[in-house]
Image (tube, rainbow, N blue to C red):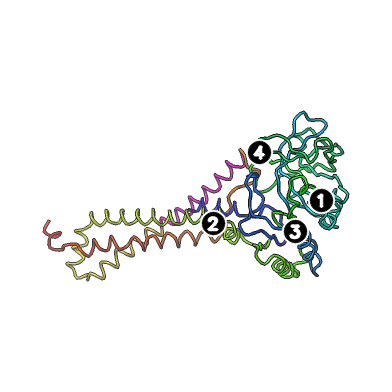
Amino acid sequence: MVLVTGISAGLATDSTADDEADVRVLPEGGGTLSSVVDVESARLGNVHETTATVDDRDGISYATPVLTEAVQVQSEGSDEPETVLALGVVPPDEPTTIEDISTSSLEPGDPHFANGSYDGPRTGEVVLTDAAADGINASAGDNLKIRRPTPTGALQLENDNQSPEYTATAVEDTEIDGLTGELPLVVLHLSELQSITGANDDDLADQVLVNAESDTSMSAAESAAENAYPNATIQSGGESEFTSIRSDDFALATSLVALVVTVVICSLFVATSSALTIDQDRQTIAVLAAVGFSVRSRLAIVAITTLSLTLVGAVAGVVLGILGVSITNYAATATVAPEPIATLRPVVVPYAIAVALVAGILALPYPLYLVARTNVVSELSR
């Protein structure tokens, strides 16, 4: 349970760096950046206008929508296009990082949006990660073609003969936390990615990142996000892993399954082992009755012994669980993961011990029943 809960906490941990955004706005049923890019999820609509109302609030450093889409990118030096994950953003006036990628080489704002007409000038600016650049043999300054892949893998352009060109303004040497392997990423202006992928019909985005000017402005950032998106999920950058688990359906389900399975297996194991022990010690129990121990006293002795052994087993299980998390992280980082996939908080220790004690209490009725039904005369006469 400790191992699975640690992995669940790792899954639920925000993939953004601590200095990226203080508040993340997600649609109900949506999620954070995922390597499963072909699965459609809930999205936020009318994001340019709504996010602008957040950005204009006092105490807000910036607010930007983020659209995540799979696209195909091809450079002049590549024979075949490469499928990458594109992030559409509205770069703020002061450069920031979105999923660890700097926006300093992108023009601030989103001129192509043009108040919803999508006929403004294109910047044609794209930032590549090193994984994306290596895949298409591109470097800063190269011209690129960005297209949306069809379900069959064929290229679908806005206009086959007049496809807009883009320029790689920078290549970022970075790894994305929380993703398996080095997923190739590109970052461009939101409206330009919306036009490529068809998300411009309802001005869609997957999430909105809000950054406060200072720690004292955090409440203002959360309030502005809640007012702008009353039906969305608001995540604070200061949430712990266990708070994040409650906002991540998959991680929550995984941790709950681990809890239920642990309680059931532990209860059955304690009940069975205690029953076997009592069966072997029936004569000892009969002797206790013969020397004057009441039924209540005998039951108390068995209960205390059972729970004490369960507590010792819980401590041993926590130690093994922590060791398992270390081994899992070592194996993951040595093979496919850029960073540890499991994380543990000190609260895991009392949580695991409490779960074990609950399981021990649930297992008590059966061994206590056997003690109460022990025939003293029969056992002493054997």
Q: CA distance from mark 2 to mark 3?
A: 28 Å
| 215 shown above or below 262 | below
Within-10-Å neighbours for mark 1: few <14, some 14–19, many 20+:
many
The mark closer to the camera, 2 or 3, is 3
Q: CA distance from mark 4 to mark 3?
A: 27 Å
Residue 291 shown left or right of residue 69 in the figure: left
Examine the structure image and report whether residue 96 is included in the region drawn in magenta: no
Residue that mark 4 sits on: 151
Label 2 vs 3, first from the N-terminus: 3
The mark closer to the camera, 4 or 1, is 4
Q: Are marks 4 and 2 in contact (CB under 8 Å)?
A: no
Label 4 vs 3, first from the N-terminus: 3
Q: Which residues are magenta?
A: 312-334
Q: Are marks 4 and 3 in contact (CB under 8 Å)?
A: no
Label 1 vs 2, first from the N-terminus: 1
In x, y percent, where is residue 66? 74, 53
Examine the structure image and report whether residue 327 is included in the region drawn in magenta: yes
Residue 123 shown left or right of residue 286 in the figure: right
